[in-house]
Amino acid sequence: MALETEAAVDASLEVAVPGVQPTRLARWRRAVVRSLAPVILALIAGGLLLLALGRNPVRFYVAVWQYGVELGGWQNSAVLMAPLLLIALGLIVVFRAGIWNLGYDAQYLLGAALVAGFGPGLLTRWPTPLAYAVLFLVAGGAGALWTLIPALLKAWYETNEIITTLMMSFIGVGIANILVKGPFQDPTVNIPQTRTIPFSKMLPNVAATRVHIGVLIALCAVLVVYYLLTRTSFGLRLQVLGANPRTARHVGINLRKVIVASFLCSGFLIGLAAVVDVLGLWAYVRANWNPGYGDTVIPFVFLARLNPLVVVPFVAFYAVLSTGGDLATQQVNLPTDFLLVLVALILLFMTVIEYLGRRRDLGQSYLTPALREALRRPLARRRSAP
Amino acid sequence: MNGLLTQSFLTALVSGGIVAAIPLMFTALGESVSERSGVLNIGLEGMMLGGAYLGFLGAYELHSMWLGFLVGIAGGLAGAIVMALLSVGMGLDQIVVGIAITLAGEGITSVLQQAQFKGRFPGLGNPSTVLIPGLSSIPVLGHSLFDQPLLVYLSVGLLALVAWVFRATTWGLNLRAAGEKPEALDAAGVSVPAVRTYAVLTTGALAGLGGAYLAIVGAGTFTPFMTQGQGFMAIVIAMLARGKPLWIAVSSVVFGMCLSIGTALQLSSITVSTDLINMLPFIAIIFALVLFARGSYLPPALCLPYVRGGK
């Protein structure tokens, strides 16, 4: 965590001191290399894995490209970007403060269940803009509310928020299922699912594409969060808390307030991801449905170094990989869970490259001290005992 | 509420609770070892799945439950080696590496299962149990406590062993020092990375064993994502138990009962939503955390990679 914030501090210093062109360029190149290398290495390792499973990796990646970008596939990828971006923003807000919100599944699904449950009724009875406004607030509010217990426990008792958000996540997913199977269930079908939002009441599309305006909402949110994090005192407070909680307390930041506020922001943004997704794409929610966006978005949030603007191209990349990968994995007769392996590989390569990069910056050997010691020891022994 | 206190219901509850508790107990025991040494292992879920898949495969192909357990331990160890190399050896962020291991465990086991069995889910036979004569005829408790696979009895011995290691050995002292004040351990001339590496490997082995038990004895088969958050439950159990093995056993059985109450309820005439039942253990944990928020304990050096001469 400390590293990302350091990088962010560097970035802000850069803005403050203009005129150091070469270092800025070098720094920029370094950042690009370190962010792209893990993705490329993971794709190569994934290809080797496919080869080991007896599949043709070239055909797989070509299929990903074809289904994800060509022939209108880019429209599906763009639609997928809407929830992914909002969840990424929700994660950035807390990660910047050095807090882990791993309860995104429940925050998303509760929002989705409520929107799909109340949406059909509200949208037919109320004027559409008012219904939209209410649904956005309901979903965002549900997401925010679901972070409250972990936030309060963290703020007052310093209970590990990783554990509490995960536990709340399991509970929230269960409640979402109970809602979909119980009060929100569509009585006219046998499968447990909510009623469907009428097609005419869905979020309108952009121009002549199938891309709904939720994507634009998400992009606007990117700008808002970027402004919030880099140009307001709240953003600075988050950054100081993330860099060093002790310092934050010394400079007089109200830690409890900042912790709770960042949690609520995070939950709200993740709830928005749900409303945009349901109103724009799905129109209903089935029981036991979980798109699992959060898990897969985490690596890209880190690769973007918690920068809301930089996360956009990364999310776009994953949207293509996911849209194309869904069909491409079926084509090579593998479960779509193969994409999880790719994401895990990206995470692992990212941490390793981060480590190597840090060593390089400090001018140290790439080996860990322990490893170097271990390699040196047998040689030293041989030398000392002739 | 008829049928809730019948003997068959209670027997099913206790016996199901114990079957479900064993994997939790092994995994939580492992987690408390690494937590004490200062490594928070979020990859537990992935290690359990690795152990479950390989354990099942071993038992299925080699026709032996015990070889299955051994292979399962190897599966958990595979994840732990990655964790030890990256998080302990290189000092990389434990949570990021842990998330990666969990994701990789979920993905790889699902892909391999599909590639190997092509949509089939072959089962294993019922595991053989060891009946302790006399004791096993006690009503309610007898059958569930004294008619279990041998590993269940061994797990009790393992608990005692870990308690003894924590309390009475240098190794246990080193372990706790690595989590409480690694500088002190380093100053005493003991390698912090080495202690933490052994701890993480122990965790992996125990999580793999827990996963293998889940697949071989608990379910009799392997299905993708079969752990359903038990790795995370184990982390909480370890945290609430503050590294005391007896508390690990007790809370594992309680959570095990929560996990298995659904099956037991089918024997009585009550119908409750399975979603609600699946939520029970987690609600219990949140309640426990809210009530005993000050009581849960984590070592101060948890999640912090040790850098000699660092601040």
Image (cartoon, coloured by chain):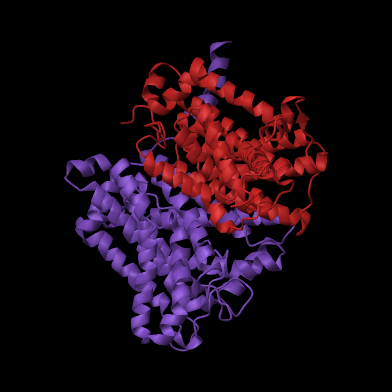
Chain colours: A purple, B red
Q: Position of residue B250 (x, y in %)?
A: 54, 33
Q: Is residue A68 visible?
A: yes
Choose between A150 and A32: the one closer to the eye. A150
Residue B219: give x, y in percent of width and height.
71, 46
Provide residue B71's location: percent of width, then percent of height. Answer: 72, 37
Relative to residue B7, is residue A213 drawn left or right?
left
* B255 lies above or below A277: above
Based on the displayed image, in which of its 4 quarters is residue A375 positioned?
top right
Foreground: A140 or B286? B286
Task: Give the image quarter of residue A261.
Answer: bottom left
Judged from this view, the residue extending furthest toward the front is B2
> Considering only vertical position in the picture, is A211 above or below B257?
below
Residue furthest top in the image: A386
Question: Can residue A356 be seen here?
Answer: no
Q: Residue at 38% across / 75% down in the picture?
A: A135
Residue B305 in the image: above or below residue B167: below
Q: Position of residue B269 (x, y in %)?
A: 65, 55
At x 64% / y 57%, what residue is drawn?
A47
B91 w.r.t. A132: above or below = above
Q: Nearer the viewer, residue A262 or A386?
A: A262
* Residue sitting nearer the eye, A293 or A50: A293
How many circles with numbers are drawn on the protein? 0
Give the residue drawn at x 36%, y 51%.
Answer: A149
Residue at 70% across / 56% down in the picture? Answer: A51
The C terminus of chain A is located in which quarter?
top right
